[in-house]
Amino acid sequence: MRDEAFEILKILFNQNGYRLYMVGGTTRDFLLGRDYEDRDFVTDATPEQEKEFLPNAEYQFAKFGSIRVKVAGIKVDITTLRVEGEYNDRRHPGFIKFVKSIEEDYVRRDFTINALYMDEAYQVHDFGTGIDDLNAGVIRFIGDPDKRIMEDPLRIIRAERFAETLGFELDDDTKEACIRNRGLLDELNPDKINEERRKGWVDRYGK
């Protein structure tokens, strides 16, 4: 099994001296054999460097390291590998810094099953328990669940949405943290909550 957009882009990035990895829900669903529409990739190239060989991409969010490009009729999101500062507003990091290492990028991601990096040879790089959790059907936060939720309370809903749509279960620490911090959902924009409902979120535990 091959991903058409990945096949085209990886050649282009390699020709220009950069690496490209499939990541996030794209890798997760690819490994599960599920259909997926979103294409998420990460690279060690910065947006300024990408402009040299992807001049027609969208660079609206380039300052955050994210660009969008259409490949073979497919919209693809490509983000530069990065580390993030402390979250000050329960939604956005205080700063971002571009890096070269997928291992450094890993620590900013939310769940183990969404932090699997697939390289150009379709080999998976897992810096936690992602593969084990994927095989076991488990949703687990990377790092301290309470801290990850306080950074961005939307992660409560994302955890429960993934469990609902994938037929997975929250691990005990993740479930307890989601229940314990549920009051933080009141701080979210209602539009964000409604968007998650449309994606399949079901409020299992109530507020």
Image (cartoon, rainbow, N blue to C red):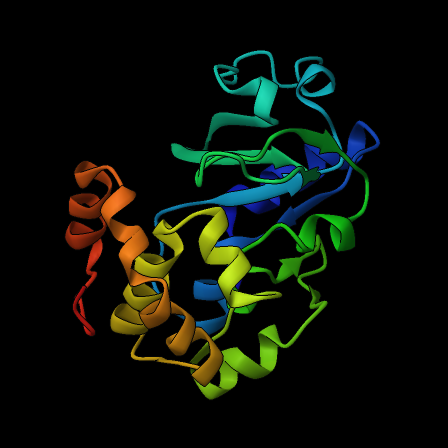
Is residue 158 visible to us here? Answer: yes
Percent across and percent down for residue 10 are 67, 41
Percent across and percent down for residue 184 are 32, 52
Residue 73 position by quadrant: top left
Query: Could you tell me which residue is drawn at 51 percent across and 42 percent down?
Result: 5
Residue 206 position by quadrant: bottom left
Query: Could you tell me which residue is drawn at 58 percent across and 43 percent down?
Result: 41
Q: Is residue 99 left or right of residue 202?
A: right
Query: Could you tell me which residue is drawn at 28 percent across and 42 percent down?
Result: 187
Of residue 111 and residue 150, the one placed in the foreground of this image is: 150
Percent across and percent down for residue 22 are 59, 51
Q: Residue furthest bottom?
A: 136
Is residue 2 visible to us here? Answer: no
**Above or below, 146 relative to 4:** below
Q: Is residue 153 left or right of residue 188?
A: right
Of residue 190 and residue 46, the one placed in the foreground of this image is: 190
Residue 115 position by quadrant: bottom right
